[in-house]
Amino acid sequence: MENCHHEMTDKELARAVACGSDGRVAFDEIVQRYCRPLTLFAIGRTGTVQDAEDIVQETFLRVYQNINAFDSKYSFKNWLFTIAYRLIVSGYRKKRPQQLPDKATVQLAAVEPEPQGNHWVWEAAREMGNEAFVALWLRYKQDMTISEIAHVMKKTKIMVRVLLHRSRIRLAKQIADQPETAEQSRWIRGRTVFIERAK
């Protein structure tokens, strides 16, 4: 039965959780799919694994408790990231979050930040402030569209376009002002999207 859940879409899994039909197994599949991306997103903003884990655990708890509120007309991934983003913005800090059901907690504890190529780029982006970092992360690490980012950040599409444009320019200048390492030199020569679009 678990194999069948691997093939389900996010919306089908959400429906299964809401209906209670194999709800726990369906929820575990949601955690499996999104634990790492949400954790990396939260670490990128909070700077600590502990705070990121707290935010992700609270995000999944809220998803589990409010699954009936999910509107299937919209993207489930956006809904998840919107919840996480709001927790980050509100400065969520809890020493002991409530426990998630079953193996969801084990999956969360097992997540380690994956090695990130060009981590120094994201360190530079983090210094530009919350909105700039989040917009860049959602666009380039989560491959979200302008519309999806606008939904998560509660901004208009035009505001997101302007934010991304300005953030890319600022990031390009910030990178240009840093002492160049061999890794940075290779990255810049590779003409990645940040430099290309910042011109």
Image: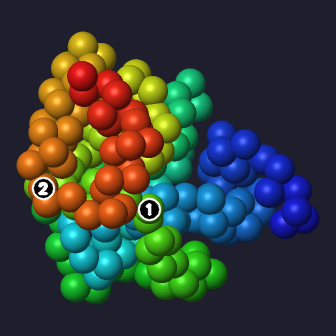
181 is higher (above) or lower (below) than 156: below
Q: Residues within 10 Å of mark 2 (few under 14, many from 20)?
A: few
Query: Picture quarter containing residue 57?
Result: bottom left
| Residue 2 drawn at (x, y percent) | 84, 66
| Residue 19 drawn at (x, y percent) | 69, 50
148 is higher (above) or lower (below) than 85: above
From the viewer's side, name the closer residue of 158 and 22: 158
| Residue 109 drawn at (x, y percent) | 49, 84
Residue at x-position 62% and y-position 59% = 33
Q: Earlier in the sequence, mark 1 or mark 2?
A: 1
Asked whether, in this view, residue 19 is left or right of residue 55, the answer is right
From the viewer's side, name the closer residue of 10 and 129: 129
Which mark, residue 117? 1
Residue at x-position 66% and y-position 45% = 10
Which mark, residue 178? 2
Residue at x-position 77% and y-position 62% = 22
55 is higher (above) or lower (below) than 149: below
From the viewer's side, name the closer residue of 169 and 56: 169
Is residue 24 visible to the viewer in this orientation of the structure?
yes
141 is higher (above) or lower (below) than 178: above
Residue at x-position 17% and y-position 31% = 169
Looking at the rendered structure, the secondary structure element under dot 1 is loop
| Residue 134 drawn at (x, y percent) | 26, 45
Query: Picture quarter containing residue 154?
Result: top left
For badge 2, the amino acid type reads Gln
From the viewer's side, name the closer residue of 128 and 68: 128
Is residue 126 visible to the viewer in this orientation of the structure?
no
